[in-house]
Image (cartoon, grey):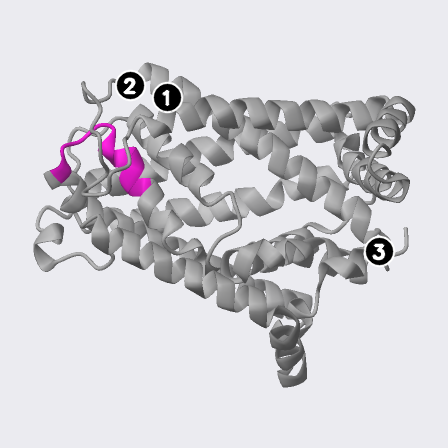
Amino acid sequence: MSDARSGWLKRHWLKLLASLLVAGAFVWLLRQGALPIVPPANAFAKMRWWTLPVYVVLWCGVHVIRAVRWHWLLAPIHPVPMRRVISVAWIGFAAVLLLPFRTGEAVRPVLIRRQGELSAWAATGTVGAERVIDGFCMSVMLLVALLASTPLDPLPSSIGALPIPAAIVPGAAYSALAVFGAAFLVMGVFYWRRALARSLTERVVGLVSQKLAAWLAERVEKVASGLSFLPRWRSSAPFLGLTVSYWLLNAAASWLLAWGAGFDRITYAQACVSMGVLALGILVPNAPGFFGAFQISIYAGLAMYFPAELVVGPGSAFVLLIYVCQVVITGAGAAIGLVWERTSVGEALDARPEDLDGSSA
């Protein structure tokens, strides 16, 4: 295991260093914006502590649902036992959370391929489909929640003391919906009209490089195979139902903890906005643990609806508690997954994107 860890560090030391610099930059931004990383004691003055264990139970449910639904994406390609699906998913979720710049994205496809009759590229297709559908559902929910809630008028021109206007949130919501809608359309074309999609890719990208065009077309086509669950209602209905449940329960858990932290008048729609902004904020590759992006995103969502003294007061308690809970639950899930899979941290770390091309169908 130590050899695997040292090997991982040799391969990724530059990414790790860069991601730590990003984390440092976020720390600087939070301090410049007077947005507490560790809240003062008085931020917990209105805390209803019974909501914390209830939140933990609810978010454990979120974590289970998020893992279980992968079963219905894999089933049309190759059935995988539910416990394997959950254990590999939990290991993968922790890898994405903790490894720099989302280098952990390869862990799920590679681990599920190692002991099953399933290619890593086909598994990557299911993960890609999951990401796109998640993003689309989240964007729709965020947009609906923005329309259903009443923000401050005028919107604050800063988040804490950071000169970033809260108006950036609605713009980000519309952009995310457009991006994920387009991504789903592209994957759909590659799935249902593969010959046409491959031909268009080779013609357009081929203007730059024929080799690149062939490589890109082949891999997008493989990833698009993850949509094979869509025409099969026995797979698509459970997956889509669980996906909607996952996001609704996630928002409900966030609403409860925010209310428990002292936001007495927070609505479910406002909690959906806070959760949606968080999902957008941690979407792009960033620091290990999504540190910094996680905190600023929640502060940005809260700043749309509540005065600054609430955002940096009870809001800082909410931000710390939700962050710690999610990181601990994700880590605990990974530990359970490692035991169930009878694998080690070193083996999980050894999963790498280049292993995808070495998989066999």
- The reply to whether residue 156 is in sight is yes
Q: Nearer the viewer, residue 325 or 206?
A: 206
Label 3: which residue? Answer: 357
Q: Nearer the viewer, residue 240 or 102?
A: 102
Q: 37 above or below 126?
A: below
* Secondary structure at numbered mark 3: loop
- In the picture, which quadrant includes the N terminus? bottom right
Q: Which residues are magenta?
A: 298-308
Where is residue 150? Give x, y as percent.
Answer: 24, 18
Q: Residues within 10 Å of mark 2 (few under 14, many from 20)?
A: some
Q: 207 above or below 125?
A: above
Relative placement, left or right, of 60 versus 40 is right
**Mark sitting earlier along the chain (1/3):** 1
- The reply to whether residue 242 is in sight is no
Gap in Å between the C-alphas at discs 2 and 3?
47 Å
Figure label count? 3
Relative placement, left or right, of 300 versus 123 is left
Labelled pair 1, 2 in contact (Cβ < 8 Å): yes
Residue mark closest to the camera, 2 vs 3: 3
As for residue 238 lying within the magenta part, the answer is no
Label 2: which residue? Answer: 149
Where is residue 157? Give x, y as percent.
Answer: 22, 30
Q: Which mark is residue 145?
A: 1
